[in-house]
Structure formats: structure tokens, C-alpha cells
Amino acid sequence: MFLKLREEIAKSLRSSGFRVLSPYKVGIGWVDLAIPRKRMGVDILDGSYDSCVERLTSHPFNDIRIIDDNSLDEFSKELGISVNPDYEEQDFEELDSPSAYVKAFEDALTYLYITGEVYEKEIDYRPLITTLPDLKRLQYAVSYSKPKLNPETFVCLTHEGYSAAKKVILRRMEMFEKKLRKLSSPESYLVALGMSAGLRVSETDYLDEYDLKSLLSFMKRLNEEKIKVDTSLHPKVALCRFLVDTVLNGKALKIAKSLKNLGLAFRVKKFSPFGHYLGEEYRIAREAVEALIKFSYAEIPKDCLKEFMALTYPLSNSDIYPIMSYSGEYLRKAEKNGVCRLEGSKINLSDRFIDYAKVRLAILVEKVIKNLS
């Protein structure tokens, strides 16, 4: 699996004096390695070549490399490193028939690894309840509070705990590799890209039918906040996040539940820093999302991405200069339809813009979903 080879290459590069970031977050998902000194991005081919190319080119690397079994030796010689040729036969440390307590200990580590933190007063995950005293005693977990006034206590992993939990996650990834590959598909690729923005999924309203009539009816029910997106995201990731939170939410929940059964996701309660209950959501292991993105691929037509940004970006920003060169055609189209007015790099929206956006989004989403088949 790519995770093993990635660990081996990163280890060899660091031993040779290179500063290596692995994995490295890029515009679309992650790539396996980044070498800042060389401004080089490296991704291991383990599924879709198109996925490798898309992710590597979503970041301004000067040099990009896609490694497979045929190019590994050449890459190693070029950088003066030695990668163990038998890495495929290595296994992460495994326990034979672990006791119930050891399993609970591992489950608690992965729970904290994936969730990030838990509100200490409301811990309802039994393995964590059972093992928390020992996790703290071994300095794998620590309690802390956020606000200065009326603080509430949360639990998270220490550096040592994070390292230990990561080994368990990697073992599970290896153990369930076949099931993860079975989960992969063009549709799951889009869902995973959406999940990559936050590594979480909440249950919302969603569709089972994707014909235009159903989509128009669905979009009509959405409030404006649902259409606003994180404008810092890559357009493709922003669109996929929108799909995960709306039309494809049912598919996203199904994948999250499948990952939960593999110990790679958890359904958790959310709390504010002051301990106020905020609802529930699934949180997903980054490694599982990486795998789904790497194993499959789905293309979204560029005109869909450009129009999506033209429909959503102005809802949060009156200054549209950042997207003018990218989405100018569709901004001018909206102006011709009388739902906005462009004044240089500024945009003024009419009251009808949101209804226009909903109709256009329905048409756009139908096109994206049809493109999957």
C-alpha cells in the first residue's frame, strides 16, 4: 500500500538531510511528499494516474514526480537515497490476539486521533472511558481548556499519543485495504474531496434522485447559508464540499458509516469551548480520505467549476477581483440576466440573484452527476 512506501521514502530522505513534509496538503487533497528545498512534489501511483496529476498540479511545485515500481530506483538514485526494495513485505507492528484492554487502548487512541479532541465531561465512548486514566499516566493524552473565563476541559493526544495512534491507523489501513478499494469509485472520489475540507460530515437534507426536476425542488428549499462556500478552497474542492453538505449528503453518510465499521471514522458529539452541545457529526481519518482520493478519480467539467464560483463567491464577497479572470464569463452572464451589476471589480447583487443561483446550481449539479456515468 502507498502508505508503507511513503513512510520508507520519507525516512530515507530525512536520513539524507532533506526536509520532507509528508503527507503535504495541496489545493486538491494531499500529495505523498513535498521537498521544500527543491520545491518538488512527489506522489505515489497506487490507483488513478489522473488523480496523481490533478493533485500535484493543484500546487505551484517547480518539479513534480509520480513514482511507481518502475521509476522508484531512478528517483532514489537521483536524490541519493536508498529505499528498502522489500518494503512491500514489511508489516506495521501487530499484536497477536490482543487482550480486550489492549484493543480498548488502541480504540481510544484512534478515537482521539480522528476526533481531535473530546469534551471531558461528556465522554461516551466506552474504550476511552476505560483507558483514559492510563492514557494520561503514560502521557499519551492530556486535558486542557480553551477560554479564560468559565473554562471547560477537553482531552486530546500528546505528541507521543499521536505517534502511537498513527501506527494503529496505518495498521487498520493495511488490514482493510481491499475494502477501501472496493469503496472507491468516481462518486466516492467527489465525496472524499468534499470530506478533505474538514474531515467531517454532518447529516443534512439530501436527494436520492438526481433528475433536474428533483434538483430544482431541492435547491429551492436550501437557505442562502447552505450555498455560501469556503472561498479559500480550490474550486473543485469547494464544489465537492457543497455536494457533500447537500445533494450527495446521503452518499457521504453511507461512506462515513462504512469507514466507521473499519475503525476509520467515528460519530461524535460536538461541543463549543464553553461546553454547549452543538449536534453530532462523523469525523473521518485523513488517511482513509487520502486513499479514496488516490484509488479513484472523477473529472468535473471546467465550465461547471467556473460557474459554481460565479454563483457562490459573490454571496460572501462584494469584491470579485480574485475570480474575475476565472469566472468572468459567468459573472457577465448573470449581469445580462439582470440579477447583478458589475462595477469594475465590485458586484452588486439584486434580490433575485439567490433564486437565479439556485436554478443554475441545479442545472450544474445535474451535469456533474451525469458526467460520473
Image: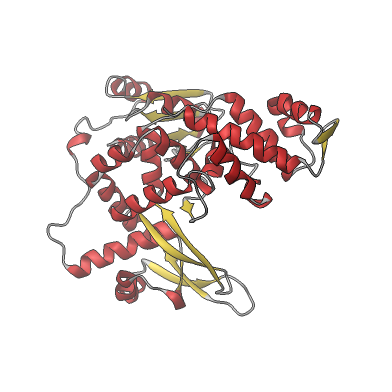
Q: Is residue 42 found left or right of 81 in the rendered image?
A: right
Image coordinates of residue 157 in percent, x first then y, are 41, 63
Q: Is residue 333 found left or right of 67 in the rendered image?
A: right
Q: Quadrant of residue 239?
A: top right
Q: Residue at x 32, y 22 (%)?
A: 77
Which of 50 and 340 lies nearest the eye of the viewer?
A: 340
Image coordinates of residue 237 in percent, x first then y, are 54, 38
The answer to whether residue 17 of the structure is visible from this angle is no
State whether residue 355 is above or below residue 274: above
The C terminus is located in which quarter?
top left
Which of 184 and 25 lies nearest the eye of the viewer?
A: 184
Q: Residue furthest bottom?
A: 150
The N terminus is located in which quarter?
top left
Q: Residue at x 52, y 26 (%)?
A: 57
Q: Is residue 253 found left or right of 347 in the rendered image?
A: left
Q: Is residue 136 found left or right of 198 in the rendered image?
A: left
The answer to whether residue 281 of the structure is visible from this angle is yes
State whether residue 372 is above or below residue 194: above
Q: Residue furthest left?
A: 96
> Which colour scheme appears in the figure?
secondary structure
Q: Residue at x 69, y 38 (%)?
A: 357
State whether residue 234 is above or below residue 64: below
Q: Residue furthest right?
A: 343
How many labels sit on residues?
0
Which of 254 and 284 lies nearest the eye of the viewer?
A: 254
Image coordinates of residue 73 in percent, x first then y, are 29, 22
Image coordinates of residue 60 in percent, x first then y, are 57, 28
